[in-house]
Image (tube, helix red, strand yellow):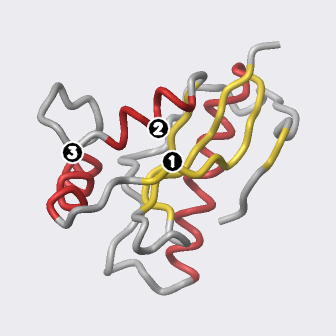
Amino acid sequence: MSTCTIYGLFDPAVPDVIRYIGRTQQPDKRRSNHRGCGVGVWRQPSRLREWKTELCRLGRKVEMKILEVCAVECSPRRENYWIEQCRKAWIDQGRQKEGQILNSRSNSVWPLDFECSAALEVRAQV
């Protein structure tokens, strides 16, 4: 079975606050891509790009936390799960105005009746 890693990006100065959720089958390569401060072809949403640019300006680099490992076919739903968990955490912590999860929207591409078993391995909580 092929697996996919669901990860969260955070500012090393505020390690308990995840700002972006993503998924990849190559976590080491993805971590390296996110940590770069150089000018290049940006494929990230603009809010993510702006946040990463600001961190670089401050002399910090984005850090990546692995949230869970799941089957590839479950990864869009698991990614959405973590995005929603982070949004709820922001609201519960009263942080709506001081920053937020940078994902522009959930990546809902699966029908509602698509069943997905729980993660193969959960490594973190929001």
Residue 44 position in % (x across, y down) = 29, 36
Query: Picture quarter containing residue 13?
Result: bottom left
Q: Secondary structure at mark 2?
A: helix
Residue at 74% in and 36% down: 69
In this rendering, position of residue 5 left or right of residue 21: right
Q: Which residue is mark 2?
A: 31
Question: Could you tell me how far apart the alpha carbons at marks 2 and 1 are, in whole angstroms?
Answer: 12 Å
Which quarter shows the N terminus?
top right
Disc 2 versus disc 1: nearer the observer? 2
Q: Camera-side residue: 55 or 93?
A: 55
From this view, report whether residue 125 is shown above or below residue 43: below
Label 2 is placed on what type of residue? Arg
Label 1 is placed on what type of residue? Ile
Choose the circle earlier in sequence order: 1 or 3: 1
Q: Which residue is mark 1?
A: 21
Q: Which residue is mark 3?
A: 46
From this view, report whether residue 50 is shown above or below residue 75: below
Residue 54 position in % (x across, y down) = 18, 61
Marks 2/1 in contact by CB < 8 Å: the verdict is no
Residue at 76% in and 32% down: 70
Task: Identify the residue at the far front of this view.
Answer: 59
Which quarter shows the C terminus?
bottom right
Choose the circle earlier in sequence order: 2 or 3: 2
From this view, report whether residue 107 is shown above or below residue 99: above
Task: Identify the residue at the far bottom of this view.
Answer: 94
